[in-house]
């Protein structure tokens, strides 16, 4: 492999919780966690400052539970706790690879994670630590995509790299539509207007208002996270109009 050069100084990686379950259908597939940790450590190895947000959908999804009758706020808090479990799994795998990490939680639980303090998070990044933001925004009615946007802005990340199971944003669902077209680039407003499945509208609006680029790419293919960090055009970039 030729020498890789990152095009970012500081990024926020967002992984969905669902990806962590692999083919299991629930919970954490350790092989997936190991591979992701390997890739994240590789990016850090290039000298890029890395923050991480992971979802919780592999363990608990608030919206689904509330649709089944559970109180929405309670269900959402359970979802946020699920992200803490995933964050600890990633932290463990990263540290076994020699990476230095900190988990910072939006819900205080000092026995397992540091409380989220913005200036401290930035300091960790400056020292080369991978910072994993757990428990979403700490508020019900939000998603971990919104947490990713919020934290990315707070720490001055140059982009959100959103790892998904598809290789970008399509004009219609590529599953079941053979004529679906993938965008190289698409505007936030287009995503909102056409209700393209990138992130929920709260997260997209937040990124739009603050001109934070989102890059959607297929992170199930080994090496892709590194490719995106090195500026390869393998996904879809969501940017201003
Ligand atoms: N959640 C929340 N507030 C936040 C972030 C997450 O209430 O700021 C809850 C919400 O119930 C959500 C769950 O945590 O369904 C798991 O996060 P998400 O569904 O975003 O994870 P992913 O889709 O990435 O697996």
Image (cartoon, rainbow, N blue to C red):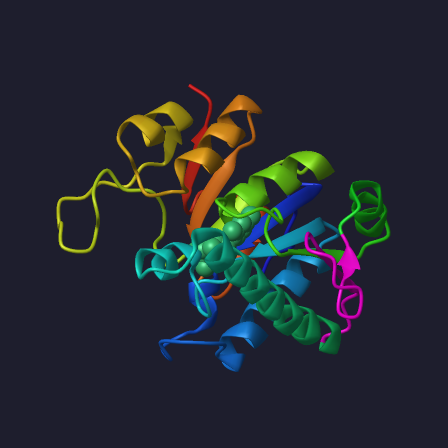
State which quarter of the image contains the N terminus: bottom right
Left or right of 197, for residue 45: right
Where does the image place residue 232, in percent across and percent down from the top left? 49, 45
State which quarter of the image contains the C terminus: top left
**Magenta span contains residue 119:** no
Left or right of 53, for residue 45: right
Q: In the rendered picture of this protein, how many numbered marks are placed on residues?
A: 0
Q: Is residue 187 above or below residue 66?
A: above
Where does the image place residue 177, in percent across and percent down from the top left? 13, 49
Q: Is residue 201 above or below residue 163?
A: above
Which residue is pictured at 62% across the width and 47% down the height? 12
Which residue is pictured at 79% across the width and 70% down the height? 111
Which residue is pictured at 21% across the width and 48% down the height? 173
**Magenta span contains residue 102:** yes
Q: Which residues are magenta?
A: 97-115
Q: Relative to the observer, which residue lies in front, 57 or 234?
A: 57
Q: Is residue 177 above or below residue 149?
A: below
Where does the image place residue 206, in percent across and percent down from the top left? 52, 30
Residue 71 appears in view: yes
């Amino acid at each position: 492999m030729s020498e890789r050069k990152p095009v970012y100084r500081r990024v926020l990686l967002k992984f969905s919780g669902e990806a962590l379950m692999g083919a299991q259908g629930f919970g954490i597939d350790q092989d997936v966690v190991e591979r992701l940790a390997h890739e994240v450590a590789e990016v850090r190895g290039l000298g890029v400052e890395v923050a991480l947000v992971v979802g919780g959908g592999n363990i608990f999804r608030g919206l689904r539970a509330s649709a089944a009758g559970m109180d929405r706020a309670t269900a959402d808090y359970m979802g946020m706790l699920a992200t803490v479990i995933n964050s600890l799994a990633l932290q463990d795998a990263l540290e076994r690879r020699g990476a230095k990490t900190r988990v910072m939680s939006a819900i205080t639980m000092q026995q397992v994670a540091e409380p989220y303090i913005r200036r401290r998070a930035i300091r960790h990044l400056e020292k080369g630590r991978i910072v994993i933001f757990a428990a979403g925004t700490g508020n019900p009615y939000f998603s971990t995509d919104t947490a990713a946007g919020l934290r990315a802005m707070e720490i001055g990340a140059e982009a959100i790299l959103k790892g998904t199971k598809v290789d970008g944003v399509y004009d219609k669902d590529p599953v079941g539509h053979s004529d679906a077209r993938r965008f190289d680039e698409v505007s936030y407003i287009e995503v909102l207007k056409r209700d393209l499945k990138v992130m929920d509208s709260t997260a997209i609006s937040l990124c739009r208002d603050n001109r934070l680029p989102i890059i959607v790419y297929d992170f199930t293919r080994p090496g892709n996270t590194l490719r995106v960090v090195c500026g390869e055009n393998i996904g879809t970039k969501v940017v201003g109009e």
